[in-house]
Amino acid sequence: MGGLIMAEKEERLRRTMMFVPGNNPAMVKDAGIYGADSIMFDLEDAVSMAEKDAARVLVYEALKTQDYGNAELVVRINGLDTSYYANDVKAMVKAGIDVIRLPKVESAEMIQQLEKDVAAAETEFGLPVGTTHLMAAIESAKGVLNAPAIAAASDRMIGVALSAEDYTTDMKTHRYPDGAELEFARNMVLHAARAAGIAAFDTVFTNMADPDGFYRETRHIHQLGFDGKSLVNPRQIPMVNSVYEPTKDEVVKAQKVIAAIEEARIKGSGVISMNGQMVDRPVVLRAQRVMQLAKVSNLLDEEGNYIEK
């Protein structure tokens, strides 16, 4: 039980992953001003074949020269079966990208091939092998069914993302307002991520004329347990953050758990108790995540007290 009072490593928040077209100089330059937790530069679907090479150079130069603050920097490269893949991998590794996102992943072997190619690039450019992290975009029925193996394919993996447009086409359906067509895929991707100990990202919501629909969908995927949502517009960031913002009751309860942890530490006790009941590790982890979200949501004053709105 002594492990209960040990401080857990604070996880990186990934509530928002904002797509940035790699061929748009203004958007690439300004991507850091909107407050997204993760910025994903897109070299794949957002870029025409005629602009692939120019987009790669643009993103490379931006990564070498622009300051994107504390955002996690991700690039969606072109697929393994394209002529752009090898140059994308080399350029992004050389630029020091945090995460490479591989599209249209259908097997663990695809991630393992990417891992080998990334390791070779790291060696070529004098970087420690293992520096670059990976994530997979799951976009087909085969990918969904293989999600557990994909999520566990490499120690470099930080997350898996569902991409709904290609997936619904593969399933011979399309997107509906209630999202029923995505429930199985969402649950498969989410459970695969949780079993592998990595993050799960929901798909984009493309109808900018329906903010209420976006809000409902974000509340739904938050309830399921997704770490965050992929976004196509920076105006969606505050709405996602508001959904992930803890309530006052959640913050107060979490503060009590943290206080109980501190009390147990001072007493040298391996057992945490609150109101006469033992507090187990899942409750501790939940409390720590609530406090992390409260801090980034500016819900606490300098002394750690909840700020009434």
Image: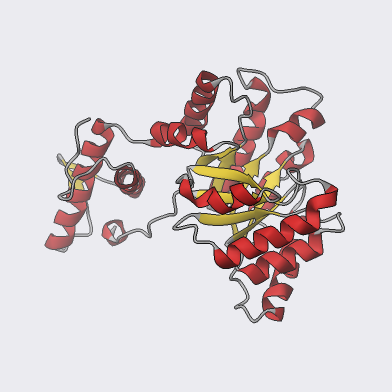
The outermost residue toward the front is 26
Residue 279 relative to residue 197: left or right: left
Foreground: 183 or 12? Answer: 12
Q: Residue at x 34, y 46 (%)?
A: 296
Residue 135 in the figure: left or right of residue 298: right
Which picture quadrant has residue 145?
top right
Please give the name of the residue rendered at 48% of the width and 37% of the height, measured from the top-left corner.
237
Task: Give the residue at x 42% y 54%.
Answer: 11
Image coords of residue 79 (percent x, y) = 79, 52
Q: Position of residue 300 (x, y in %)?
A: 22, 43
Q: Nearer the viewer, residue 162 or 273?
A: 162
Percent across and percent down for residue 62 are: 60, 61
In the picture, measured across the screen, residue 174 lies left or right of residue 154, that is: right
Residue 97 appearing in the image: no
Can the viewer see residue 148?
yes
Q: Quadrant of residue 100?
A: bottom right
Name the quadrant of the N terminus: bottom left
